[in-house]
Image: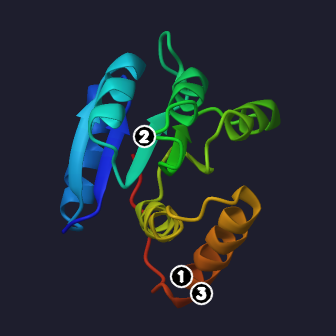
């Protein structure tokens, strides 16, 4: 069964781009244009991984992370935050709200694929320190083995 990815972003172009690229890699993709819609979909059918835009109209990505972490069905769902503006304060706030990692725009697809696969492998680890440690190890390992390709960005 294909790993499922829920993409939550308020920009149609970004949703279409990510959906097309990730579906071509064999992932089962679902999308949501709002944070509320993303929360509802994630709770109804928890994805293997969630890609979540940080800057959306209310609720924003931080509020979505908090809501998902507070729900028993989604508290362990891996969440990768995607944003175009990444200040240290935003990184800290998104991580404190429950995000597992972040990806900045423009998106480097090979790097995103590594992060999706690595966080998917760590989804069942309940201890936050152990989960982060294993995720970091996997990203390093996969990055070192990845062929060098030019990034494809959105």
Specify the quadrant that holds the N terminus.
Answer: bottom left
Q: Are discs 1 and 3 less than 8 Å apart at CB?
A: yes
Q: Which residue is mark 2?
A: 73
- Closer to the camera in the image, 153 or 27: 27
Task: Choose mark 3 or mark 2, whichever is in front.
Answer: 2
Label of residue 142 in the image: 1
Q: Quadrant of residue 94?
A: top right
* Element type where label 2 sits in the image: loop
Instruction: Characterize the local packing of mark 3: few (<14), some (14-19) or many (20 or more) Cα atoms within 10 angstroms.
Output: few
Q: Residue at x 51, y 64 (%)?
A: 124
* Element type where label 3 sits in the image: helix
Q: Is residue 98 left or right of residue 89?
A: left
Q: Quadrant of residue 50?
A: top left
Label of residue 133 in the image: none
Q: Residue at x 42, y 66 (%)?
A: 113
Q: Residue at x 78, y 37 (%)?
A: 92
The image shows residue 142 at horizontal and vertical percentages of 53, 82
The image shows residue 153 at horizontal and vertical percentages of 41, 52
Specify the quadrant that holds the C terminus.
Answer: top left
- State the separation of the CA atoms marked 1 and 3: 5 Å
Q: Which residue is mark 3?
A: 144
Q: Residue at x 61, y 50 (%)?
A: 100
């Amino acid at each position: 069964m294909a790993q499922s990815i829920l993409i939550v972003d308020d920009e149609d172009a970004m949703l279409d781009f990510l959906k097309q690229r990730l579906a071509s890699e064999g992932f089962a993709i679902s999308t949501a244009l709002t944070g509320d819609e993303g929360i509802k979909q994630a709770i109804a059918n928890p994805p293997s991984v969630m890609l979540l835009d940080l800057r959306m109209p209310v609720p924003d990505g931080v509020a979505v992370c908090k809501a998902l972490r507070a729900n028993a069905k989604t508290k362990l769902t891996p969440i990768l935050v995607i944003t175009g503006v990444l200040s240290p304060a935003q990184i800290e706030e998104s991580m404190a709200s429950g995000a597992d990692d972040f990806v900045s725009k423009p998106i480097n697809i090979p790097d995103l694929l590594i992060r999706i696969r690595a966080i998917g492998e760590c989804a069942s680890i309940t201890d936050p320190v152990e989960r982060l440690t294993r995720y970091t190890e996997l990203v390093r390992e996969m990055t070192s083995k990845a062929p060098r390709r030019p990034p494809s960005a959105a």
